[in-house]
Image (tube, helix red, strand yellow):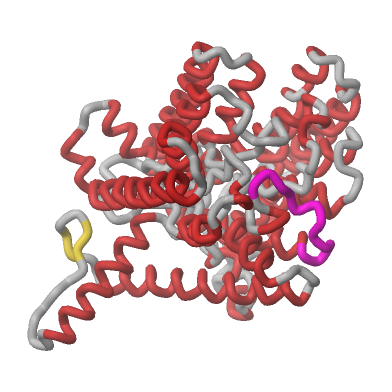
Amino acid sequence: MTRNASGTTTMNDVKALLRLLGTLMMAEGVAMLSCLIPALHFHDGTWLPMLLSGAFTLLLGFEMRYSFSDYKVIKDRRMSYLLVVMIWVVLSLFGVLPFMATGAVTDFTDAFFESMSGLTSTGATILSDIESMPSSILLWRSMSEWIGGFGIVLLVLAIVPSLGINKYSLYTAEASGADNTGKMTTGMGTTVRHTLTIYVALTAGFIIILMCAGMHFWDAVNMTFTNISSGGFAIYNDSIASLTHAQQYILAAEMLFSGVNFMMLYLMFTLDWKKIRHKWDQFRCYIIILAVVSAFVVVSLHYKMDFDWSDALRCGVVQTLSVVTTTGSVISDTTQWWVPLMFLFAIVPLTGGMAGSTTGGLKMMRVLILLRNVKCILRNRLHPKSVSPVRLNGSPLSNELITNVMVIFFVYVVVMFVGTLALIVSGINATESIGAMVGCLTSYGPGLGASGGFGSYAAFTEPAKWICSLAMLMGRLECMSVLMLFMPGFWRK
């Protein structure tokens, strides 16, 4: 893209943006076409609509990509934020095609809800009978979560050598968990490629492990796609409850890894222990929260729900991992659990996993900074003359970073409050409104009441589904990138 003398965005900027969108639509079309494999193998009768959906998306993307092939440079930083939001919205719109073309979902609102939920790796669903869905649709749902879990924008940075646009601004605009607390010792492209390598390696590894545990290849692929991405879409009506105990523990391991910073996993794999210290504090916080919440859930299931210790341990640990990592897989009908546990599961997803993971929520890094800032403020109240900087990994944090974290937290809370109020106005009761907003904004998925446990959002009103779809988008982009588009100054020349 180019910029004129006054610094305003030119038409060339828009054309370059459309060029990149075209490239991503081509990739989405190829992903749709790959769903022809199960359609033909299982003879579910959806090969033609899947072929048409994929071909249309691919060809339209090809037309956009090569119609604007001469426009490659973007210099206006504002376009980073606009591009990121447009990527998720446009790809979600075209992600509707497989659902409606195959007849799996006939209502556009429901289809868009399902598409947005997949690409944002939220896992909220409007499907009440998942097992009746065609195999091609099941794979499309799983694949959309796998792609969205890593982050469409991060995939772009990994596979496109030259975007023209400032890569760091695009990376932070998507903000699916960018960890900027440590110094980058490698280039942005190299960092993202290393992360993608770990993501693909974990995916392949867990598919093989699940097959060794007796799971069919088809189930292993879908289950791994949706759990390593912290998505949680199921291929069974009872989510993961009907799996063997060994398979459930393997999926729990997937969730555990999905909540760890993927660059940290790469450093562990390469035995580069010195660089890991930049992420050690939030990793320790992540493990401590998992341990404390798991212990409380296990004990509660044994003493309050009369689970024997082995079932309490299995259900408690697996479900806690699902909640903390905002995966949303369900091992038991949690709507029938002890009420305090149900509300605990509506709060814990706010933390999420580590920054730089596939999880949603605020991320452990921000939670840790907020807690340590509170501690420092209380200490300064007791000792006004003392100097107590907020530290992370042994290094003091700048006031600017602390302020940014506090602002994001404040915006997060306001969006959740306004969203809950909007759901109540749209006809959803207060309890379900709170659960749905937490589930969609944190990317956890399941809510409370009918939308919790093995339930779905099918009974929600049409306005409520659109509100939830917007919440998924805002939660995936951590609110700021979306809210920025509503600022009058963003559009001024």
- Where 92 falls versus 398 (above or below)? above
Depth order, front residue of 488/272: 272
Depth order, front residue of 175/421: 421
Residue, x 51% and y 15% (percent of image)?
A: 213
Depth order, front residue of 480/46: 46
Q: Is residue 18 left or right of residue 148?
A: right
Q: Is residue 248 left or right of residue 420?
A: left
Could you tell me residue 283's position as x and y percent? 29, 46
Q: Quadrant of the C terminus?
A: bottom right
Q: Is residue 80 visible?
A: no
Q: Is residue 425 left or right of residue 163?
A: right
Residue 490: name its quadrant.
Answer: bottom right
The magenta stretch is 453-464
Could you tell me residue 93's position as x and y percent? 78, 49
- Where 281 falls versus 147 (above or below)? below
Residue 30: name its quadrant.
Answer: top right
Residue, x 60% and y 61% (percent of image)?
A: 474
Number of disc labels: 0
Q: Is residue 170 magenta?
A: no
Q: Is residue 458 magenta?
A: yes
- Where 354 falls versus 430 (above or below)? above
Residue 415: name its quadrant.
Answer: bottom right
Depth order, front residue of 97/124: 124
Residue, x 35% and y 74% (percent of image)?
A: 403
Q: Quadrant of the N terminus?
A: bottom right
Could you tell me residue 342's position as x and y percent? 55, 57
Q: Is residue 275 left or right of residue 475?
A: left
Residue, x 59% and y 16% (percent of image)?
A: 215
Could you tell me residue 91's position as x and y percent? 71, 46
Q: Is residue 336 visible?
A: yes
- The secondary structure that most of the magenta stretch takes on is loop
